[in-house]
Amino acid sequence: MRSTAYDAEHEAFREVVREFLAKEVVPYFADWEKAGLVPRDLFNKAGEIGMLGLQVPEEYGGGGTSSFKFNAVITEETARAGVSLGGFSVHANVVVPYFINICNEEQKKRWLPGLAGGELMSAIAMTEPGTGSDLAGMATTATREGEYYMLNGAKTFITGGHNADLVIVVARTGHGENRRDGLSLLVVERDMAGFSRGRNLDKIGLKAQDTAELFFDDVRVPAANLLGEEGRAFEYLSANLPQERLGIAVAGQAAAEAALRTTVAYVKERKVFGKPVASFQNSKFELAGCEVEIEAGRAMLERALDEHDAGELGAADAAKVKVYCTELQSRVIDRCLQLHGGYGYMLEYPIARMYADARVTRIFGGTTEVMKTIIAKSLGL
């Protein structure tokens, strides 16, 4: 079916992204997976062609667009190319919006040009060793001492944590009647004394994406690095969650589509009992079933993209599209791997890496179970 989400400007940008990935990423990606890290200079190159700060206002060096669909194009083309860009999507889709929407004027002038150009990469530190989805239970503290906050605590599973120059840290600065009260956002800069990074965590998949442990030992964070108002972090975090979850849904949908493409090509070439695997009825039925589900996911996703660009995508609808597209990703890739037979378990075949990479999308950005809780609440349950 014909896509209706993108216009000519989006498609022209798609060609720029596709060319960039073919030249700057695809030839080197296997080495990056082995290293567990995307080289820092990739982000400078991406910034030079306008990929990093698409929504950053033009006066601060960004693209000045209000459309998230350009970000979606990058995610789709990354999946099509069979690569990943480390902490790129977290930086562009999740973290930069906080700087755009919450920063005061001095902070915008200080940080936005670098964030848009690739000189400054960012990450956000929410999850702690003892808390996952329960953000209100975090133990990291920031105590105000004159013109500084004294920050202490630890964070884990921080995407892009090793390459990040700026880390938005969620810390407890006070207490209130509600457990969610008293949380604030502080920007920690790379070279601040007492800020250290632990090992690059060894994951099942997403091998080229650095995932860090971060430690804060009496880090003196200037009060000028407070984002927004003290005690309002939970409100700020909640406001950005629909876009974060939509971005994950885009990645899930694009990965499912990429898996189907590579599997259709494989079954046409691979022969069993003297015949192409594609000639067997089971292969046809399995892939036809995948295609139907993918079309349904694409329709749901594009509706969500339209609603988000119109400022109308709510928390429950974002949860729905994340659940559907990430669960779809896992189902389709599993069925496609099965059609590869034993070769599907070999990492030299793209489907094997797709399988390993897929599992986490149903966890980060809010687990499927948390998403269902949000959806149930919207039903009055």
Image (cartoon, rainbow, N blue to C red):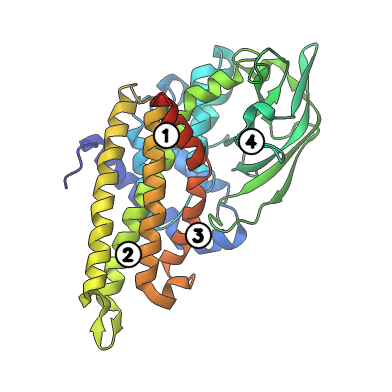
Between circles 1 and 2, the one closer to the viewer is 1
Quadrant containing the C terminus is: top left
Circle 4/circle 3 CB separation < 8 Å: no
Circle 4/circle 2 CB separation < 8 Å: no
Q: Among all residues in the image, which is located at the extreme left?
A: 2
Q: Earlier in the sequence, mark 4 or mark 3?
A: 4
Q: Is residue 77 visible?
A: no
Q: Earlier in the sequence, mark 1 or mark 2?
A: 2
Q: Which residue is mark 2?
A: 262
Q: Earlier in the sequence, mark 3 or mark 1?
A: 1
Between circles 4 and 2, the one closer to the viewer is 2
Q: Which residue is mark 1?
A: 319
369 vs 101: above or below: below
Q: Earlier in the sequence, mark 4 or mark 1?
A: 4
Q: Which residue is mark 3?
A: 356
Between circles 2 and 3, the one closer to the viewer is 3
Q: Which residue is mark 4?
A: 165
Residue 92 or residue 299, whichever sits in front: 299
Q: Among all residues in the image, which is located at the extreme bottom?
A: 274
Circle 1 SS class? helix
Residue in view at x 56 percent, y 36 percent:
119
Circle 3/circle 1 CB separation < 8 Å: no
207 vs 156: above or below: below
Circle 2 SS class? helix
What kind of residue is marked 1? Ala
**CA neighbours of label 4 inside 10 A, class few (<14), some (14 to 19), many (20+):** some
Residue 16 or residue 66, whichever sits in front: 66
The image shows residue 243 at horizontal and vertical percentages of: 43, 31
Give the spatial CA distance, label 2 vs label 3.
16 Å
Between circles 3 and 1, the one closer to the viewer is 1
Residue in view at x 64 percent, y 37 percent:
127
**CA neighbours of label 1 inside 10 A, class few (<14), some (14 to 19), many (20+):** many
